[in-house]
Image (tube, helix red, strand yellow):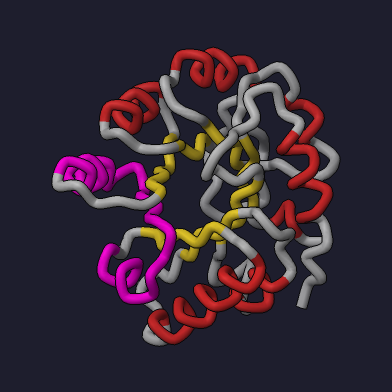
Amino acid sequence: MPPYDAGRSLARQAARLDGAAHGSLPPLLALTDPQRTPDPVAFAARLPRGCGLIYRHYGAKNRFDIARHLARVARERDLVFLVSADTGLARACTADGQHFPESRLPEAARARQRGDTGLFTAACHSRSALTRAAEAGLDAALLSPILPSASPSAVRPLGLMRARSWVFEAGLPVYALGGINADTVRRLKGCGFSGIAAIGGIKG
């Protein structure tokens, strides 16, 4: 099991970004992944206090049990806990909010329109997706992939110049996701990001 020791350093550096988020938005958002975080509860337990955790279960049969455990860890460690792509599960475990894949931005917009509360974030991979996320009333977007990533699903990175121009036009706080770790985080300076989102970059 990886020690997940890099989270503390990433959180400190994320808090110093020029567009650093304030209020209910944490500086670091950690995402679970079935392959790269096989024990999401252990992963959550090592995150720095005050950070965020996005649980992506991908239909796991034991997702309700895991979500309840994660919610308890989040309360104990003062983590912002979001559930991805599952409104029913988010309500069942009293999560702090929801995370939406880009393909489900219309669902996020409808949820906001009917008055659903909590922190809403979404994955975005294009300028138009950032615009739609802002129009939907979301609290933040995770833009990816910014840099080359080891993720099996990673596509060609956006690059910092393109990402920077999109961030300053976005109309909502934007987190950098993809290829962000203790060695590359310094390259985000001056790009306007409000925080960092990571999976593999949190491993020690």
Q: Position of residue 67 (x, y in %)?
A: 45, 76
Q: Does residue 106 show up magenta in the picture?
A: yes
Q: Position of residue 96 (x, y in %)?
A: 43, 59
Q: Residue at x 27, y 41 (%)?
A: 105
Q: Quadrant of residue 109?
A: top left
Q: Residue at x 29, y 45 (%)?
A: 103
Of 165 and 49, the residue lying toward us: 49
- Spot the residue most to the front: 23
Report the magenta stretch's main SS.
helix
Q: Quadrant of the C terminus?
A: bottom right
Q: Quadrant of the N terminus?
A: bottom right
Q: Quadrant of residue 187?
A: top right
- Is residue 28 depicted above or below 14 in this figure? below
Of 36 and 52, the residue lying toward us: 52
Q: Does residue 76 show up magenta in the picture?
A: no
**How many labels sit on residues?**
0
Q: Position of residue 48 (x, y in %)?
A: 74, 59
Image position of 150 (left or right of 31): right
- Is residue 103 depicted above or below 96 in this figure? above
- Is residue 94 depicted above or below 168 in this figure? below
Image position of 111 (left or right of 36): left
Q: Residue at x 52, y 82 (%)?
A: 69
Q: Position of residue 5 (x, y in %)?
A: 83, 62
Q: Quadrant of residue 203?
A: bottom right
Magenta region: which residues? 87-113
Q: Residue at x 53, y 37 (%)?
A: 144
